[in-house]
Image (spheres, grey):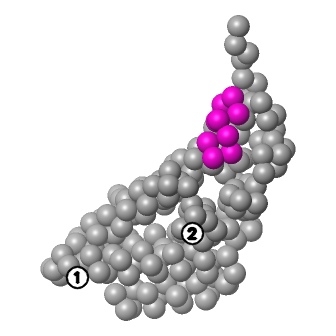
Amino acid sequence: MARKKQYIEEEVIEKAMGLFWRNGYEATSVRMLEKEMGINQFSIYSSFGNKQGVFLESIKCYKRKAKNELIDNLKNSKEGKGAIKQYFKDFIEFSKQSKKSKGCLLTNTVNELGENADPIITSEIIKFATDIKSLFIEKLKFNSLIKHSIINKQANYLMVSLQGLSVASKMFEADQLNDFIENTFENL
């Protein structure tokens, strides 16, 4: 007879996500996950397969959190560029929720693992970035008669700017970050 889980997967994954977000993938050990998640190694392997499995579930958790707190607002906004600008501002708040500036879990992972990243992890990150870029394109078209090729270039510019903002949010003050956002949209 299978043992009943003594924990709620969503809750332990949220804890694991926070740990990965703070420490990075490589620096997070299974022992650290045990302590943070409050479950033993057997339960981790039984439920998630391995550390990578926990991380992939953490990425899913991060995406849900970002969707609920950031992406839905962007998607539902009736503004064009203004909605994207608000997304940038909201992102700063999102990245600093725990008083410790953590940036973006996915950007942090790209910076940490680079070209050595597991293809499955890379695929999840690329899909997320592609979805955000598509929303940026949609909003840029919203109140614009600009050619599609220019809109695509603007969306690329915004994606790179967002990555820069993510890294900068880990060390710069709010007024500096707001200046960056203002300049980004003045140059658009």
Which disc number belongs to residue 173?
none
Magenta stretch containing residue 46, yes or no?
A: yes
Residue 142: quarter of image: bottom left
Which is nearer the eye, 161 or 96?
Answer: 161
**Which one is earlier in the sequence, the residue at label 1 or at label 2?**
2
The boundaries of the magenta stretch are: 45-53
Which disc number belongs to residue 150?
1
Quarter placement of the C terminus: bottom left
Is residue 85 in sight in this rendering? no
**Residue drawn at the location 77% of the way across and 42% of the way down:** 37
Question: Residue 101 at what x, y percent from top left?
Answer: 70, 71
Residue 159: quarter of image: bottom left
**Disc 2 marks which residue?**
114
Q: Seen in the image, is 184 located left or right of residue 135?
A: right
Badge 1 crowding class, 10 Å Cα cut-off, few under 14, some 14 to 19, many 20 or more, is few
Question: Residue 63 at what x, y percent from top left?
Answer: 51, 52
Picture layout, residue 67 above or below residue 10: below
Q: Seen in the image, is 121 located left or right of residue 172?
A: left
Q: Amino acid at mark 1?
A: Ile
Quarter placement of the N terminus: top right
Q: Seen in the image, is 21 located left or right of residue 188?
A: right
Q: Label the magenta part by its dominant secondary structure.
A: helix
Q: Amino acid at mark 2?
A: Gly
Q: Secondary structure at mark 1?
A: helix
Question: Residue 183 at what x, y percent from top left?
Answer: 45, 91
Is residue 164 in sight in this rendering? yes
